[in-house]
């Protein structure tokens, strides 16, 4: 692994189903983030984690949950998917000592 | 509220120069970032400004004026591969990034 990976690449999901998007980084970055990107809108922060064992809510956390059991993994769970959660989801990470965030390739999620 | 404004779309000619503007109103300021995002791909980091002035990196330069809440990204010697969306983001007082909707840059031969 080099950088950040996300799985799945894309998914079509029935409304009401539970879904976990996976994110793994191998850069030993302390901070990790989940964003959603919708047409015409900027990236919006869903949840973040400044370090393993801690998480925080972003701008649009409702309907989503996260966990950070270790440094490398930061899964995002939709407990009961709704059509408004149709979006492209990006995971990102950053080191406290560096400024930029590094992004994974994204997961395209469609909720029907 | 927090707000970042950028033009939705711009068109430029191969070999020319283009300036993409970004204005912001945020709760606190801890730096401004520019990212490039090709269609269907992830954003990638281009530049970072925290002090007023111009930062130059090859064909790309970024300028910041904190007193005016204003930044621009300058792209010189445009190439077809520069066709992409350019995202402006400000790190606020909570050290979270607030993102603009992005400027889609179309390069014509």
Image: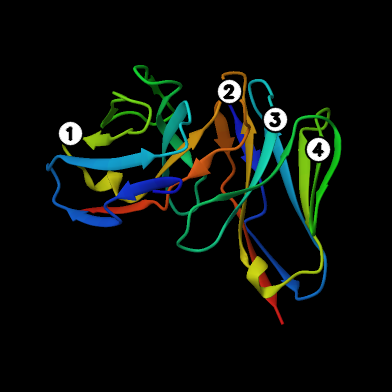
Give the residue at x 26% y 52%.
Answer: A8
Residue B14: quadrant of the picture: bottom right
Judge from the rendering whether residue A92 lies leftward or rightward of residue B77; answer left or right.
left
The answer to whether A1 is drawn above or below residue B91 in the figure is below
The residue identified by callout 1 is A79
Q: What's the CA distance linking mark 3 and mark 4?
A: 9 Å
Give the residue at x 64% y 33%.
Answer: B90
Q: What's the CA distance linking mark 4 and mark 2?
A: 18 Å
Q: Chain of mark 2?
A: B
Q: Which mark is residue B31?
A: 3
The residue identified by callout 2 is B95
* N-terminal-most mark, 3 or 2: 3
Give the residue at x 35% y 50%.
Answer: A87
Q: Secondary structure at mark 2?
A: loop
Give the residue at x 38% y 27%.
Answer: A71
* N-terminal-most mark, 3 or 4: 3
């Amino acid at each position: 692994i080099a950088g950040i990976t996300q799985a799945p690449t894309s998914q079509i999901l029935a409304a009401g189903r539970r879904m976990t998007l996976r994110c793994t980084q191998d850069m030993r970055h302390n901070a990790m983030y989940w964003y959603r990107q919708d047409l015409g809108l900027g990236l919006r922060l869903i949840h973040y984690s400044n370090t393993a064992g801690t998480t925080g809510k972003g701008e649009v956390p409702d309907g989503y949950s996260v966990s950070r059991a270790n440094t490398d993994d930061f899964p995002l769970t939709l407990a009961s998917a709704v059509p408004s959660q149709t979006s492209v989801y990006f995971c990102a990470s950053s080191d406290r000592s560096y400024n930029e965030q590094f992004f994974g390739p994204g997961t395209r999620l469609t909720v029907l | 509220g927090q707000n970042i404004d950028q033009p939705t779309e711009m068109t430029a000619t191969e070999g020319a120069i283009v300036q993409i503007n970004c204005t912001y109103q945020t709760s606190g300021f801890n730096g401004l970032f520019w990212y490039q995002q090709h269609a269907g791909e992830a954003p990638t980091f281009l530049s970072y400004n925290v002090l007023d002035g111009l930062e130059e990196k090859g064909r790309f330069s970024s300028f910041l004026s904190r007193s005016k809440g204003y930044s621009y990204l300058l792209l010189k010697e445009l190439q077809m591969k520069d066709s992409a969306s350019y995202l402006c983001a400000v790190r606020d007082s909570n050290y979270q990034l607030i993102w603009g909707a992005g400027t889609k840059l179309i390069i014509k031969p």
